[in-house]
Amino acid sequence: MNRTEAFQILGIEATKDERALKNAYREKLAVTNPEDDPEGFKLLRTAYEEACRYAKEPENAQPQEKPRDTTPSGLWMEKAVEIYQNIRSRQNVELWKALFDDDIFLSLEEEENCREKLLHFLTDHFKLPTEVWKLFDKKLSIVKDAKALREKFPANFMHFIISRCERGEDLDFTQFQGPEDGDYDQFLEYYDRCWQALHEGKLEEAERCVQSADSMGIGHPVMEVSRANVLVRQGRIEEAVALLEEQLVKFPKDAMISYNFAEILWGQKGGKDGVYEKRAAQLYEELKAENESHYMANVRLTEWYYEAGRYRDAKKCAEKVLAAGSDDAFMDLLVKVNAELEKGLESDFRENRRWESGLDLCWCYLQDGKIARGIRLALEIEKLLPPEKEAEYYGLMAKLYVEEAEYEDAIAMTRRWEPALEAKMERNAGADEAEDKKDRDRLRQACLIRIQCYHSLGFRDKENFALAIEEGKRILTGDAKDAGVLLEMAQVYTEMQEYEQSLEIDRRLVEEFQIFAAYASMLETCRRQLDAGGVVRAASQCIRYFPGFVKSYEYLAKVYLDLKRGEDFDKVVEDAERNGAGSVLIDAYRFQMKEEVMDVGQLNEKLKEFRRSYFKQVEEGKEEYYEIGLSILTEYLYHYPDDFMLVERAIFHRAAHRLEEAREDFEKALYINYANPYALNGLSFTHKYLGEYERALFYLKKAILYMDKEMSPVIYADMGNLYALLGDAEMAYQAYRQYEGLAGENKNNWFGDNLAEFAMRAGRVEEAAAVYERFYVKNNWTRYERLVNMYLGAGLKGKAQQVLGQWKKEMGGGFGESFLRFLKGGSATADGKRSTVSYPAYYCCKGWWELLYGSRNGAVRAFDRMFRNGLSEKTMEGKICDAVFACILCGDAERGRRYAAKIRRWLEAEGKQSGGGRKYYNRQKGHLQMEFLAAYYTESAERLQEILDREERCEICHTCTSPLCRELEGVRILFLMRLGKREEAAERLRRNLRVQPWDEYMLAIRHLGFGDNV
């Protein structure tokens, strides 16, 4: 190791101050653990020893010269060193070519010696322009012989020079200014250390690096960029801006200067009244004009164009970013861009049925995670597409199906995608080289999708793992593009219990491609093999490269727990806490280090008692049981920290409406067991209650994929409810039919109500009616109530009126007399048994018929009769809410105030309850509607707005199946009308009717609020 490299590793300037050397060594040693990073520790120790040797040398000591290498290859290397030492000749490709054309290099005896000596020289002298690296690769076969060279040279060196040979050097060597024989390597080391110091927040060190570089009499724009960043950190932004403007005058359109200048300006967003931001955007646009795929220019311009309302330009930039990969923050921005584009595309497709709009919309839905909607639209537009769009369509469908966890359908689509791509390439051969390259990449994508799908399907049927491996082998190319495929193959081999195959791939990924994520794959494989030493080694490497990777600490802690190595265990726990990688599993292992683990039979008995004593109470809304129960359940989890117990605790969290905590435990359970159907199902419900229906559907479909024999078929009904929430009534109906086929006779009226509802929404009105006939064959009046509501939603005015007439006839025309009969015991049904008679139900249905098709007076009159014919204020609060809604819509404030007072009394009585469950505990939005209606006539507009604003903090009602909350959307529009915002109310009404045209609240407002003119 040379002296310069030694001090660079220590992170200080060259010095003979032994105290400074020790301090620097200790500082680096604190973050370099010899067990975790033996290679790094060895380098640090060597650097320290070299620095100490330098410190002990007398001031006037001359460095001991190595004996001259007079071999032919040694003499050849002297020429190479001479070329390198002069900054001008170093850049002269012709001089390097002449060196490689020398007879010594071309001789069979010396060629390999020359190559090896030059590569050894490059380990310390590697600052070369791109053209020279390309020549070196051609003459020295660096990339081609990488595997053999890795046996002779350090892995990090090989990774570095291969990347230089393949991608080149970013630095423009022609921009250097200074003496030809200056120490340009040292100058660039100051530059590298300056950037490292800036990254670590060490401003003083960065300043010293700039000053040291200045003292060398060498200049280059990279150091001016470093200086500008130092100025920015010092708060001297205007000086930094002036400096970089000056550099751009000297080096017009220099990409390195422009990019760094743009980043500095972008970091000052809002400064100087937006001038900096505007100038940054101009620079990004110039960068993009030179290189359309410039990653950061496209990232920044996506945001810039979005904020400027240039959504199509934003989307074009975003597509370039997506091609290279993006983070969650960018995807959130893309969702906003797509949301704006979708408005126009949806309108255009709805009105003109243009396939172009439909196809663009499908891609937007895919990027936004609106997968069910994307699939539905894609199936709708398939017949509209021209033949030349066939390949794009199949690719779109394959990607949509993957995101929906429909893996078999995704595989089938890739099988259609490939021949369509090949036909397209043959058809357009030679016409567009760039598009041809993209199509070849798409062929590879098709194979990658199948690998992913077979991998996921393998957890259900293990033979699919082998198919994933076959697909992977098909597309291996032997270069860096293989990394992602190899990593997936290693994970599949682990699932197949072919551990040596997996470890061999992981080692190759680390050694050849420097893919350190492979250590995580090694870690899992070693754990499965019960290889404690392997776990320790792999976990240590994971912590070195990914200090926040929780599983490393968990697996290490478990090894040390099992081996009873308390000190090592405590250190792992301490490191995990320091790196923010704590977890419930580590807490459990810490508990087990001190406590005896209970018998599993004892645990099961305790869980049964817990469910009776705590879970049931919390489920009913008795929240005071939550904290006590949580501490008990967590201790049980500490005894058995596995996916079963995590699911148990997650369900308890969810029952208490602690959804984020529930999500965390469900995800942790899947972290342990990827294919746990109960964790997947639980996570589905959690996302559903959070209003994230697409994610909920994804997890539910995976739960169905991996479900065991003990799992209830009601999961298909749950899937139907999710499709309903997503606005896909036909799929909801089909899912319920699946459940019906599996459940046999084990079905209740709840199932029948939803089946009929979804049939109606899907346009299957007669089937819906038949369902009600079947499920309520012995309860005529409930059947009539369901039929009237169904026909009202379907827009069948006459049918609804006909059922109301039959209902009225069976109850007897004189309602006073019939009510007396009701008080005496009800009325007989067709089989002679008594059934509960609900006059309020009849009048409520009659009132809704009037709201949708009749008159204001008729509606108010019907609801008034509802109150005078047996309505129970204690149990029929929903019908009272309907009456208040009707009074507001019909403008009858007198009755409305009276009915609203009844809701207030109901809410007051609810608030006084103690020791019992809450009726609306799982219907938060329904309760919010009651609060609004109770306050409508007595509270200010500001107070009413506050009530409505609470909706965003509410879960959806657990039994809801409407894409939009009907109750709250209804009162929101009434409130807008009260505020005089009729246009806004009309627009909201139109939007809601497009989403759910069967919504009785919207239909009523359209009829009586807008005279059917919306």
Image (spheres, rainbow, N blue to C red):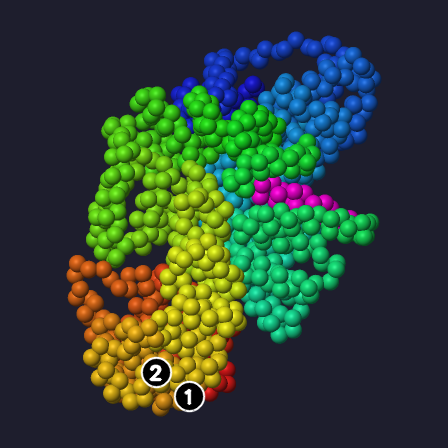
Which region is colored magenta?
433-454
Residue 438 in the magenta stretch? The answer is yes
Q: Which mark is residue 854?
A: 1
Along the horizontal axis of the image, is 175 left or right of 16? right
**Residue 349 in the image: x percent, y percent?**
62, 70
In terms of depth relative to the viewer, which is nearer, 1005 or 220? 1005
- Residue at disc 2, secondary structure: helix
Q: Give the residue drawn at x 37%, y 61%.
A: 748
Which residue is painted at 81% across and 25% down in the image?
98
Q: Which mark is residue 810?
A: 2
Position of residue 165 measured from the top left corner of the image (x, y, whole percent):
69, 32
Separation of marks 2 and 1 at Cα, in angstroms: 23 Å
Q: Is residue 782 above or below residue 808?
A: above
Type of amino acid at the residue the image marks with label 1? Gly
Mark toward the viewer: 2 or 1? 2
**What secondary structure do most residues of the magenta stretch adopt?**
helix
Give the crowd class for mark 1: few <14, some 14-19, many >=20 residues within 10 Å: some
Q: Is residue 264 visible?
A: no
Quadrant where the N terminus sits is top right
Question: Disc count in the image?
Answer: 2
